[in-house]
Image (tube, grey):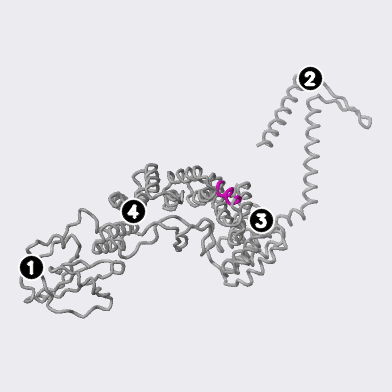
Amino acid sequence: MIRVLVFLAVVFALGLGFAWLADRPGEMLVTFNGYQYQVSLMVAAVAVVAVVAAVMIVWWLVKALWNSPYTISRYFRVRRRDRGYQALSTGMIAAGAGDGALARKKTKEAAKLIRSDQEPLIHLLDAQASLLEGDHEGAREKFETMLDDPEMRLLGLRGLYLEAERLGDRNAARHYAGRGPAVGPQLAWAAESTLEDLTGRSDWDGALKLVDAQKSTRQIERDAANRRRAVLLTAKAQALIASDANAARTAALEANRLRPDFAPAAVVAATLLFRQNDVRKGSKILEAAWKAEPHPEIAELYTHARPGDAVLDRLNRAKKLQELKKNHAESSLAVARAALDAQDFSTARQEAEAAIRMDRREGAYLLLADIEEAETGDQGKVRQLLSKAVRAPRDPAWVADGVVSERWAPVSPVTGRLDAFEWRAPMERLGQLIDSHEDSPEAPVPAIAASAKPAEEKTEVIEQGAVAAETPATEAKTENRTGEAHVTAVTAAAFAAVPDDAEAVEPAQELARLPDDPGVDPDDAADKSTRRFRLF
């Protein structure tokens, strides 16, 4: 575009010059070799311009003829290079698509058309083709060769790192990843692998420095960096609790400042503060974490902040937590546990039932069973609650890569990944999937009618369920005269629906015990009522 504008400007200038000469007539007299030549000024100007143009054209022709061998060779060289880059592009696409044969073919073609020292991508395509062909040893040799070239060193380290990961050699992988930050601090894969190595060796200070470097180079976002720092500082505080309480307290408080809603950091910080008799500050930290997300460890530590407190004082502290987070299952469970310790069974039962209504889970039923046993000692109701606990969803726990832990840990024991543990419910049990609507109020309650002549009918009663924790459900199976089986679920409500004037049902004969039937405890069998209607 600029050349076109320059050309137009020159033409415009020439036009203006000729117009100016045309308006000012004149003559030019030239004496050469005894002759005088007289022409007008306009003709002289045109002649000069024509001579200059002719000289320029002649010079261009001479220069073109002189440079023609180089021009011809450059044309063929560019054409050859274009073909080589086309082969290289096709080979990279084939390698990405998994076509090893085409990738190898295009590698050889590109190597013939382009010098490998001029285009490093040929080495990459060659290594990728070897990997697709299954020649991992050859690929590793090519990656090792790349380490000698400063331009290809990072690519070689990356390839050797991936090969070590594929072979499961974590030490070799971390070795190559450790060399990465020295060459390229911006490499995220090298930084992540080095971070796993540092956390695996419990080098929390080195891991913190690496996270700071990642944050400064903007490899990770600010929130993610603060989360990682909080996790690492919490792990450091846990490691220093026994040896250096002051350093552990500093680390825990900084972790809590970065993430006030991180329960492990709040628990560690409050524990260290309570040990130093700073109950007020520790309680504030736990209260802030409880408002963000209630956690049973927070409730346990908060209610037992003062070891010498009476059980009623602990109950009051649990109620204070409940005021901070109302209508939450963890709040009700915390009050229920404190009330059970204080022997306030009415409050404990009320809060436990409220927790079940808000979040039906295993721990709530187990707590309700403890309350029932402590208050009434009714083993029948206790077993019924235990049976419900087996079929209820499991309580939340720290889960990472399929591992369920009662305590939080900074790294996964399986993969070594930092901040892998999550507070959530583990995988559901089969009993929950089979009977997940037992407590639904809309479910119809079947009534069992007592037979007037049980001895004349071919009735077989199979009693299963001596231990609630081992048997997910109890069913009574009857067989009618036509031989068709009919299965009816037996619940406590169904037994309660039997009228008082119903006749007792005596089994026609005692059947052989099934292989998976635990039987009935003799003490329980002696406690049976005269009606012989008993769930367990």
Marks 1, 2: nearer the viewer: 1
Q: Quadrant of the C terminus?
A: bottom left
- Between the residue at mark 3 and the residue at mark 2, the CA separation in whole angstroms equals 80 Å
- Between the residue at mark 1 and the residue at mark 2, the CA separation in whole angstroms equals 145 Å
Query: Which mark is first along the chain, 1 or 3?
Result: 3
Are the residues flagged by discs 3 and 1 in contact, CB closer than 8 Å? Answer: no
User: Is residue 251 located in the magenta-colored stretch of the structure?
Assistant: yes
Residue 25, numbered label:
2
Residue 523 is situated, as x and y percent measured from the top left of the image, at 24, 72
Q: Is residue 17 above or below residue 295?
A: above
Using the image as rendered, state which of residue 314 and residue 238 is in the foreground: 314
Marks 1, 4: nearer the viewer: 4
**Residue named by callout 4:** 340
Marks 3, 1: nearer the viewer: 1
Residue 497 is situated, as x and y percent measured from the top left of the image, at 13, 60
Q: Is residue 321 above or below residue 408?
A: above
- Between the residue at mark 1 and the residue at mark 4, the CA separation in whole angstroms equals 41 Å
